[in-house]
């Protein structure tokens, strides 16, 4: 029963979504399935939050390596959830001034807005920005012209890196307009429009065929990996 | 020397990268930008829409991509305000709504405060919805099923701008600022394929190559990374001289740090390969 119910749901939902593309009568069912999916997606946030809570609570309880980070994570999690759910410090909206919870949870100046603006925003941006340091280190250590393919890749990277900044424009500004493809920006455009696009098309077609195959396997119950590792 | 380069501590590289970015950030050098054909096409599409056209602003990004995508989102809003287009903002990324609010606050109600754009008539903020591509499918079939109210809880039926807006095909243009999944690819696949829909995209540099196959049939134009945003700002500045001042253009200002970071990367690649060749000649392959 534990396995059959999800398989039936997957089969019915999958077949409905597929047939609705060709049978207009089934469109309301497709829409209903979509709405259910969106509700489930929202509930997944609760499951995700609970999972985060349990995972880090266990690490703290067992004092595993790095449990201090888990403590910081949980404290931040509880503060953010409390401030957001309680709409702490949020003034009532203009439309309903007598209802204390009528304001928008992310109103400018409210604590949650402050958390977002001065903690979440800079911290996540910093994490992303750190990539530039590792890419630079990798460029020095790993980007070696060891064979013909690597040399082609290296040459392409050179052209694109220069073509995507002002240096490329400046260095080839003397090239006549009729030979624009020989400038760094022009060559970059050609690489993107011809080679990259051709490669991407091939990859997309391959992925699409793979997705179609996997979807069919899931609908038919041949692929049960989504039910968990034990299945 | 070769031994030193072989054992080069990566912290020196980190320091060089920090300097390559920090010095231009502080000195603010400005370099000229020219719109590429992809950028020009998107700019012309918005420019040629009749005044008062409805533009659906799908801002699918969050703070990690703000440095790259924020300037192009701002430019899209700025351009729509200049053309007095009606704007419907929406977001499919959970951490994204404050960034939409920021654009509304700084551009619609800040930079264009004198135009007195009215909420509900000139612009509406629908807010965030989960569901990724399924949410896009719903927006493409029946918007009210997924957005019965706007971000503040107002019924879409009472707002003049959304009263007769049934689905995405009632928009004259979709402008998608996308940091990944769900994003531009999903908008093309799950909304664009259902009918005649014009979609313009502003995306991260990593995403751009995946979207080139969709141009020019499914996408009317693509802004790729901060360079695309700078080109778009240049296009606006060429048409609207009040924006010719580079200090008003975030992306153009950011092209300075980008230039020096790219040059450093090239220098490091060359140096790394010189070391590699020298090692091979010496007989010790590393």
Image (cartoon, coloured by chain):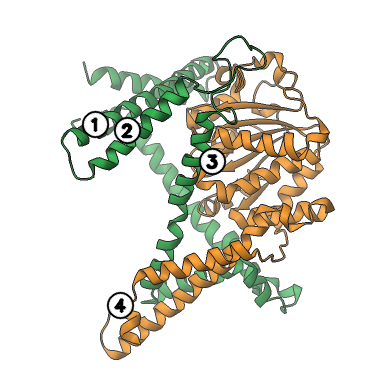
Chain colours: A green, B orange
Query: Residue A164, can we see it?
Result: no
Residue found at x 55% / y 22%: A90
Dividing the picture into quarters, in which one does residue A52 lie? top left
Q: Chain of mark 4?
A: B
- Relative to B157, residue A179 above or below: below
Q: Please tell me whether mark 2 or mark 3 is closer to you in this view.
A: 2
Q: Which residue is mark 1?
A: A57
**Subunit that carries the residue with mark 3:** B
Label 3: which secondary element: loop
The lab-note entry on whether marks 3 and 1 share a chain reads: no
Helix, strand or loop status at disc 2: helix
Secondary element at tag 1: helix
Which of discs 4 and 2 lies nearer the camera? The answer is 2
State which tag comes first along the sequence, 4 or 3.
4
Tell me the mark number nearer the camera, choosing from 4 and 1. Answer: 1
**Circle 4: element type:** loop
Residues tagged 2 and 1 counted as in contact (Cβ below 8 A) = yes
Nearer to us: label 3 or label 1: 1
The residue at which mark 3 appears reads as B61
Q: CA distance from mark 4 to mark 3?
A: 40 Å
Q: What residue sits right under mark 4 in the picture?
A: B7
**Of the pair B105 and B64, the residue shown nearer to us:** B105
Q: Check the residue under mark 1 and report the chain it is in.
A: A
- Tell me whether the residue at label 4 lies in contact with that at label 2, contact meaning CB atoms closer than 8 angstroms: no
What's the CA distance linking mark 4 and mark 2?
Answer: 41 Å
Same chain? Circles 4 and 3: yes
Numbered label attached to residue A74: 2
Mark 3 vs mark 1, CA separation in Å: 30 Å
Q: CA distance from mark 2 to mark 3?
A: 25 Å
């Amino acid at each position: 029963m534990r396995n059959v119910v999800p398989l039936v749901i997957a089969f019915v939902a999958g077949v409905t979504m597929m047939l609705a593309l060709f049978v207009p009568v089934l469109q309301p069912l497709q829409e209903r399935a979509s709405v259910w999916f969106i509700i489930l997606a929202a509930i997944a946030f609760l499951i995700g939050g609970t999972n985060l809570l349990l995972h880090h609570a266990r690490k703290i309880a067992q004092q595993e390596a790095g449990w201090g980070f888990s403590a910081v994570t949980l404290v931040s999690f509880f503060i953010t959830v409390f401030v957001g759910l309680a709409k702490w410090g949020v003034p009532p909206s203009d439309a309903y001034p007598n209802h204390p919870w009528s304001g928008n949870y992310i109103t400018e100046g409210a604590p949650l807005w402050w958390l977002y603006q001065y903690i979440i925003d800079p911290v996540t941006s910093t994490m992303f920005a750190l990539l530039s340091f590792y890419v630079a280190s990798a460029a020095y250590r790993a980007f070696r012209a060891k064979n013909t393919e690597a040399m082609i890749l290296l040459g392409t990277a050179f052209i694109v890196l220069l073509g995507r900044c002002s240096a490329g424009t400046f260095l080839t500004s003397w090239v006549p307009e009729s030979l624009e493809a020989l400038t760094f920006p022009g060559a970059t455009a050609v690489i993107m429009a011809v080679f990259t696009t051709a490669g991407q098309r091939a990859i997309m077609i391959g992925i699409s065929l793979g997705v179609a195959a996997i979807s069919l396997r899931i609908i038919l119950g041949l692929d049960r990996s989504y039910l968990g590792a034990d299945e | 020397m070769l031994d030193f380069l072989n054992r080069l501590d990566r912290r020196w590289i980190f320091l060089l990268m920090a300097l390559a970015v920090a010095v231009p950030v502080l000195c603010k050098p400005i370099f000229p930008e020219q719109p590429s054909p992809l950028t020009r096409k998107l700019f012309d599409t918005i420019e040629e829409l009749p005044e008062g056209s409805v533009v659906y602003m799908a801002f699918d990004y969050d703070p990690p991509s703000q440095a790259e995508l924020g300037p192009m989102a701002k430019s899209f809003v700025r351009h729509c305000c200049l053309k007095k287009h009606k704007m419907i903002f929406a977001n499919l990324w959970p951490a994204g709504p404050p960034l939409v609010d920021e654009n509304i606050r700084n551009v619609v109600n800040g930079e264009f405060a004198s135009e007195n754009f009215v909420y509900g008539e000139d612009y509406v903020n629908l807010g965030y919805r989960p569901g990724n591509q399924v949410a896009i499918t719903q927006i493409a079939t029946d918007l009210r099923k997924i957005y019965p109210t706007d971000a503040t809880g107002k019924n879409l039926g009472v707002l003049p701008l959304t009263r007769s807006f049934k689905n995405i095909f009632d928009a004259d243009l979709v402008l998608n600022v996308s940091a990944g999944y769900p994003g531009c690819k999903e908008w093309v696949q799950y909304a664009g394929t259902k009918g005649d829909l014009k979609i313009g995209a502003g995306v991260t540099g990593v995403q751009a190559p995946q979207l080139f196959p969709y141009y020019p049939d499914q996408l009317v134009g693509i802004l790729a990374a901060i360079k695309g945003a700078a080109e778009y700002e240049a296009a606006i500045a060429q048409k609207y001289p009040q924006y010719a001042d580079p200090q008003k253009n975030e992306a153009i200002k950011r092209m300075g740090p980008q230039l020096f970071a790219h040059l450093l990367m090239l220098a490091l690649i060359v140096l790394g390969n010189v070391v590699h060749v020298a090692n091979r000649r010496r007989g010790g392959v590393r």
